[in-house]
Image (tube, helix red, strand yellow):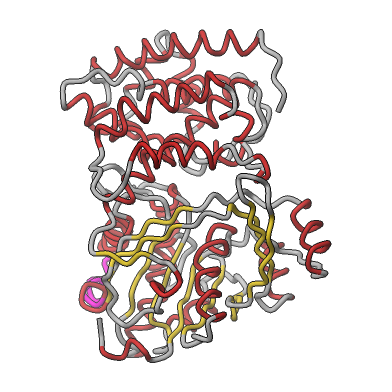
């Protein structure tokens, strides 16, 4: 790390979502509360589809209240003022580019959801993705785009031209090896754009640490603002609610300084992989499994779904029999971690919805679950417990196609025509298991088809039992 680590700096974050404001901004707030205000934070959206939150934060000058809640239901409130500069969205990202080109900006971080990176299992960028195509067209016309790659290209090119110095690119999304993968996507984007000069500059002047962030952050409802007003007297139009648990693990690979995060509980390490694998396989995969099963059983919230003994058994057995054997224990007690995760998901006070967690399932299945199936098959085991999760997702897709899902399904990576073809096939399991976008080299593997077919029959029995049960959301 450079010797000027103690010099003041700015973090520019791409994305004003609740997840970022519940972890990265809250961590910087903890430093400010200790009197360490050397680092400041600015943030803005890449798209114009979150205008209400953006407008509220602009009006409130970046201030908002973070409500946290324990599994026992105890709530606490904290005023957050560390988000010092909210950048209004505009096509071409002029505000973000201007800040990113300043030498004071020494870290550019981003949260754009798993699907926002358009990468397959081998880190190949989907050049045919409509958003990527649009950004490549914009770039050839001299404009920054609205994907993370198009926006970063615009910011970094302006920084190169200004001679503003090196900058760390910090991905905070739920991707394995998220620093390396987001970097691979950016370099491929620049290669497709034919901008070798900027690509060479990025290679020489940026680093991309891996990170792992763990905090359940439901989509805020109006009830949060009501509680915030009653507890604090602040009429907050952009509050955030999260569980009281927070873990942030960051690889020590910064090229132009960083805040003293470890002073407020951030775990700085040379290798994030053991932490991220435990989280992805024992938290993210379990979260998705609970949501898919919950949607089939008619539950509205995650805590209600995980309270169902049948659903809890499905995800507990998946974790115990298939996921944990794939993980390196090291300093992590994996069984205790599994139990803590299930306890956190049972937090009724969060009101975390099945609808929210079901979003972007098409990207979550290959990212969170397929690696466990692949590794178990490679080791000669039949992953019958793990196969229940994709079987639940297939059942979810079939319900969705039939118009029998009670909420709007948000999925930026999915192709409805592909879903329709899977569901209309004479053998939906085989059609589902043949999708390279989901399974990569496992697509069509007879061993995969066999375990998913068996699991789909078990899920059908689960659905039948749920239809005859009295479900109380």
Which residue is nearer to you in this view: 141 or 342?
A: 342
Which residue is nearer to you in this view: 169 or 303?
A: 303
Report if residue 198 lies within the magenta region: yes
Residue drawn where x is 25% and y is 71% of the image: 199
Residue 350 image position (x, y, % from top left): 65, 46
Which residue is nearer to you in this view: 373 or 197?
A: 373
Q: Is residue 132 left or right of residue 70?
A: left
The chief SS type of the magenta part is helix
Residue 162 image position (x, y, % from top left): 36, 90
Asked if residue 198 can be seen in this view, the reply is no
Which residue is nearer to you in this view: 203 or 467?
A: 467
Q: Is residue 68 left or right of residue 105?
A: right
Q: Is residue 177 left or right of residue 294?
A: left
Q: Which residues are magenta?
A: 192-201
Quick check: 452 above or below 119? above
Q: Quadrant of residue 354?
A: top right
Residue drawn where x is 31% and y is 60% of the image: 210
Residue 110 image position (x, y, % from top left): 45, 64
Residue 156 image position (x, y, % from top left): 36, 76
């Amino acid at each position: 790390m450079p010797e000027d680590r103690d010099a003041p700096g700015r973090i520019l974050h791409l994305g004003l979502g609740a997840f970022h404001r519940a972890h990265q901004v809250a961590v910087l707030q903890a430093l400010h509360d200790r009197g360490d205000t050397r680092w400041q934070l600015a943030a803005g959206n890449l798209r114009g589809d979150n205008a209400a939150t953006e407008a509220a934060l602009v009006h409130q000058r970046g201030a908002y209240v973070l409500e946290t809640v324990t599994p026992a239901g105890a709530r606490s409130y904290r005023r957050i003022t560390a988000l010092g500069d909210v950048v209004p969205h505009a096509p071409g990202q002029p505000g973000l580019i201007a800040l990113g080109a300043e030498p004071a900006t020494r870290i550019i971080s981003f949260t754009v959801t798993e699907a926002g990176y358009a990468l397959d299992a081998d880190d190949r960028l989907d050049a045919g993705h409509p958003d990527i195509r649009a950004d490549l067209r914009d770039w050839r016309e001299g404009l920054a785009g609205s994907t993370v790659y198009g926006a970063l290209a615009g910011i970094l090119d302006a920084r190169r031209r200004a001679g503003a110095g090196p900058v760390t690119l910090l991905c905070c999304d739920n991707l394995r090896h998220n620093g390396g993968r987001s970097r691979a996507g950016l370099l491929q984007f620049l290669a497709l754009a034919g901008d070798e000069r900027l690509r060479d500059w990025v290679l020489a002047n940026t680093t991309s640490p891996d990170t792992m962030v763990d905090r359940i952050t439901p989509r805020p409802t109006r009830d949060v603002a009501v509680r915030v007003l009653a507890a604090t007297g602040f009429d907050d139009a952009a509050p955030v609610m999260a569980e009281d648990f927070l873990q942030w693990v960051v690889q020590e690979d910064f090229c132009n300084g960083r805040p003293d995060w470890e002073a407020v509980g951030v775990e700085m390490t040379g290798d994030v992989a053991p932490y991220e694998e435990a989280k992805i396989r024992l938290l993210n995969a379990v979260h998705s499994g609970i949501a898919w099963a919950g949607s089939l059983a008619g539950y509205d919230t995650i805590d209600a779904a995980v309270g169902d003994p049948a659903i809890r058994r499905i995800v507990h057995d998946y974790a115990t029999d298939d996921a944990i054997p794939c993980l390196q224990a090291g300093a992590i007690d994996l069984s205790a971690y599994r139990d803590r995760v299930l306890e956190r998901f049972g937090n009724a006070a969060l009101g975390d919805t099945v609808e929210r967690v079901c979003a972007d399932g098409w990207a979550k299945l290959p990212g969170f679950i397929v690696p466990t199936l692949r590794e178990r098959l490679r080791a000669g085991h039949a992953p019958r417990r793990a196969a229940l999760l994709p079987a639940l997702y297939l059942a979810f897709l079939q319900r969705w196609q039939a118009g029998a899902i009670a909420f709007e399904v948000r999925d930026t990576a999915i192709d409805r025509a592909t879903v329709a073809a899977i569901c209309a096939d004479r053998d939906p399991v085989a059609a589902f298991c043949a999708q390279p976008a989901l399974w990569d080299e496992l697509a069509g593997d007879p061993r995969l088809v066999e375990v998913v077919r068996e699991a789909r029959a078990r899920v059908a029995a689960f659905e039948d039992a749920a239809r005859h049960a009295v479900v109380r959301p």
